[in-house]
Amino acid sequence: MWARKTAPRKVNSPVLLTGLATCAKCGSGLILRTGKSGRYRYYTCSTQARKGKSVCKGQSLPMAELDDLISNVATEAIINREHCEGVLLELAERNDARDFEARRRSNELAREKSDADSAVARLYRMVETGMADLDDPEFVARFKRVKDERDIIAAKLDRLAVLKSERISVTPDQLNEFAEFLSARITTGPMTFRKSYLRAFIDEVRVDGDRIEIIPRFEAA
Ligand SMILES: [Zn+2]
């Protein structure tokens, strides 16, 4: 029997810090390696993994440990009130755009409603002046149709008014709730969300033994 030198095992499941974590000694990326039957998962320098310890002494850190550390630091740094307020204000602005459309639609419906009201009033007048007879089934059907149309328009207007009253406003309570929601998603949410969120704020996680340096994507002004 002969043993083949095994390459680092390729793992398809998304890894939180690939592409972000680097080896401070050689600058190459950290990759996931797994130990005995996948029980141990750790980040290791890709140069060391490919070329051996003589090329780079490398890094080796339990994956869960580094993932937790970075998630927690990111949560504290990212989830501050200003950040949450910014996100929520953006949502409110989008809401304003929706409001503008609602106002336009509301004006349009108000015009339609006024036309429909006039049509109904006209038919009433026809009855009052004896020009139309409520015994005439054709007239009654027309009367009903015109009134139904007006009622539908009125119902649409009511619905718009309800939607308008459901507008978002940013209160301190909502801000706190939102901050909690975001930190939960960053630490335990779906991996794709966690990865993209970290990438939005962190440029690099430079690992040098016990020293871990987080380089933000942009410095706060
Ligand atoms: Zn290295």
Image (cartoon, rainbow, N blue to C red):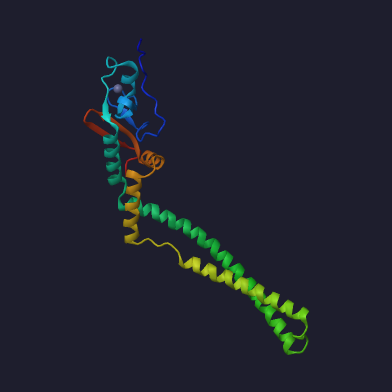
Is 9 drawn above or below residue 220 in the view shown? above
Residue 145: x %, y % from top left: 70, 74
Q: Quadrant of residue 21?
A: top left
Residue 91: x %, y % from top left: 43, 55
On the question of residue 70 being in view, the answer is yes
Q: Quadrant of the N terminus?
A: top left
The residue at the point 33 percent across, 56 percent down is 177
Q: Residue furthest front?
A: 1
Q: Residue furthest left?
A: 210
Quadrant for ligand 1 reads top left
Q: Quadrant of the C terminus?
A: top left
Task: Choose between 50 and 25: the one closer to the eye.
Answer: 50
Task: Choose between 120 and 187: the one closer to the eye.
Answer: 187
On the question of residue 35 being in view, the answer is no
Task: Choose between 3 and 145: the one closer to the eye.
Answer: 3
Is 33 drawn above or below residue 77 in the view shown? above
Residue 81: x %, y % from top left: 31, 53
Is 126 drawn above or below residue 84 in the view shown? below
Residue 51: x %, y % from top left: 33, 16
Q: Quadrant of residue 4?
A: top left
Q: Residue furthest bottom?
A: 129
Q: Quadrant of residue 63?
A: top left
Would residue 123 be found to the left or right of residue 186 on screen?
right
Would residue 53 be found to the left or right of residue 185 on screen?
left
The residue at the point 72 percent across, 82 percent down is 123
How many numbered tags mark residues here? Answer: 0
Is 175 drawn above or below residue 131 in the view shown? above
The residue at the point 34 percent across, 38 percent down is 202
